Image (spheres, rainbow, N blue to C red):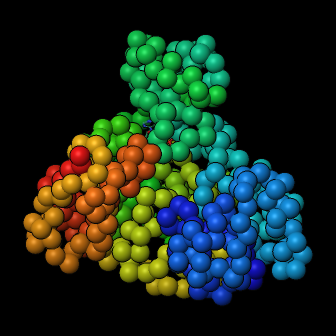
């Protein structure tokens, strides 16, 4: 099978998905705006052919680059797992007659208002919301919805420009910060815990699923630098409140008539005991969440996704053995990493429960924690017992410290 795969070198997980496609027997054509020399080795080794393009998101330019190859090796799949390319991939499928999500089917995964409208019409509990393209419209929405509320871009990612607003005075302070955002979604604030529901589907059937818990909720973890945000993949998906989210997620997939590929939904379990929809993408989660899925079951979910896409099956045995948590660290101070403290204690205490260490080395410049959840690096721990896993993750949050100068 000939597969066109978008941006095999970036973001960080993409090379592993490319490798998954290769492992499953596809002939893999990568397309991206990186020169071939700067592709990570894992990506380069997975590709049969690479098509470098200068203007990655320009439909005509991309079409011109791929058409001659499509004539010779007709693409049976055009796959994009990166949010900015979802609509482009859909258009290319339509223009080349390749199966998969078309443009109209992709919009409800991209436009947060259309998403909630379609789902509300299907009877799914979504936060009350309105779209607003002017300051007046934001004020009107705030009166209709009431405080506290959330204001966020219609097509946002990474919690950028997302604010919790508690009062009219607070809203007046926030509005000038949104000047550069053409259109926002104003939503009822849902107070509660926040989880994901992630699936790999083929032909409308769920072949693999996963629930992860964000600690704390991303809107908090991404606004306070001192926090070490965690994502924790749950071993036990049978707890009643988790089941409520899974049922919500399954209803969402049905309402969107989702067929084949990876999905990543976020949802809340509210303090009033309700599962409430947050958002959904027709792609895997980032932030090392797919690695957590691998560590949770000792499987290769990258390859599992590729198998579902290519063969419509998921043949690896899914046995949930561990809770797995990634803890992202942010250094204190600016500049380069000069000291890492507490790592020896953590290693001694946790031993083989630490399955991955990926901290910036001494001398490396700090990353921008606002732009990347990965921040200055991370550790992944796992344990069959949830409380033990949480305790280890919290200890890494508080005891492991990086310093920059
Ligand atoms: N209605 C809401 N009630 C409570 N919290 C909310 C609401 N909407 C968004 N949030 C908070 O803001 C965060 C970011 O919002 P959302 O997930 O919609 O945007 P995003 O920028 O696409 O996120 P990301 O790319 O980080 O997944 C959520 O994870 C959640 O913590
Ligand atoms: Mg989100």
Residue 227: percent from left, percent from top: 26, 45
Where 23 sits versus 348, above or below?
below
Residue 204: percent from left, percent from top: 66, 67
Where 194 sits versus 189, above or below?
below
Q: What number of labels is visible? A: 0
Question: From this viewpoint, is residue 168 visible?
Answer: yes
**Foreground of the two, 265 or 242:** 265
**Foreground of the two, 8 or 274:** 8
Horizontally, residue 331 falls left or right of residue 67, namely left
Horizontally, residue 283 falls left or right of residue 239, namely right
Where 76 sits versus 285, above or below?
below
Quadrant of the snapshot with the N terminus? bottom right
Identity of the residue drawn at 59% across and 29% down: 181
Identity of the residue drawn at 48% across and 38% down: 160
The image quarter containing residue 138 is top right
Identity of the residue drawn at 58% across and 82% down: 45
Question: From this viewpoint, is residue 102 visible?
Answer: no
Residue 325: percent from left, percent from top: 30, 63
The image quarter containing residue 308 is bottom right
**Foreground of the two, 51 or 188:** 51
Residue 7: percent from left, percent from top: 63, 64
């Amino acid at each position: 099978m000939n597969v066109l795969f978008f941006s095999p070198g970036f973001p960080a997980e993409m090379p592993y998905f490319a490798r998954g496609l290769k492992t499953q027997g596809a002939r893999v054509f990568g397309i991206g705006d990186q020169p071939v020399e700067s592709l990570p080795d894992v990506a380069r080794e997975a590709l049969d052919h690479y098509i470098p393009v200068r203007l990655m998101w320009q439909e005509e330019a991309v079409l011109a680059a791929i058409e001659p190859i499509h004539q010779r090796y007709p693409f049976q799949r055009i796959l994009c797992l990166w949010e900015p390319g979802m609509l482009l991939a859909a258009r290319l499928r339509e223009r080349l007659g390749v199966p998969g999500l078309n443009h109209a089917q992709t919009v409800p995964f991209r436009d947060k208002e259309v998403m909630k409208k379609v789902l509300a019409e299907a009877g799914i509990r979504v936060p009350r919301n309105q779209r607003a393209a002017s300051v007046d419209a934001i004020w009107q929405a705030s009166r209709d919805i009431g405080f506290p509320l959330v204001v966020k871009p219609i097509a946002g990612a990474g919690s950028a420009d997302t604010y919790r607003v508690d009062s009219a005075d607070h809203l007046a302070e926030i509005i000038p910060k949104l000047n550069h955002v053409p259109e926002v979604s104003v939503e009822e604030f849902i107070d509660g815990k926040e989880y994901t529901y992630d699936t790999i589907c083929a032909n409308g059937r769920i072949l693999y699923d996963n629930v992860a818990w964000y600690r704390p909720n991303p809107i908090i973890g991404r606004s306070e630098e001192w926090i070490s945000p965690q994502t924790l993949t749950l071993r036990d998906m049978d707890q009643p409140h988790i089941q409520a989210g899974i049922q919500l997620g399954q209803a969402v997939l049905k309402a969107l008539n989702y067929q084949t590929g990876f999905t990543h939904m976020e949802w809340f379990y509210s303090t009033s005991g309700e599962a409430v929809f947050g958002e959904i993408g027709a792609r895997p989660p980032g932030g090392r969440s797919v690695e957590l899925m691998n560590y949770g079951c000792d499987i290769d979910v990258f390859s599992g996704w590729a198998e579902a896409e290519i063969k419509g099956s998921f043949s690896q045995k899914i046995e949930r053995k561990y809770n797995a948590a990634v803890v992202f660290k942010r250094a204190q101070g600016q500049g380069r990493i000069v000291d890492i403290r507490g790592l020896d204690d953590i290693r001694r205490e946790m031993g083989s429960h630490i399955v991955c260490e990926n901290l910036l080395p001494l001398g490396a410049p700090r990353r921008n924690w606002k732009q990347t959840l990965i921040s200055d690096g991370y550790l992944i721990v796992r344990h069959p017992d949830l409380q033990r896993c949480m305790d280890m993750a919290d200890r890494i949050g508080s005891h492991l410290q990086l310093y920059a100068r």
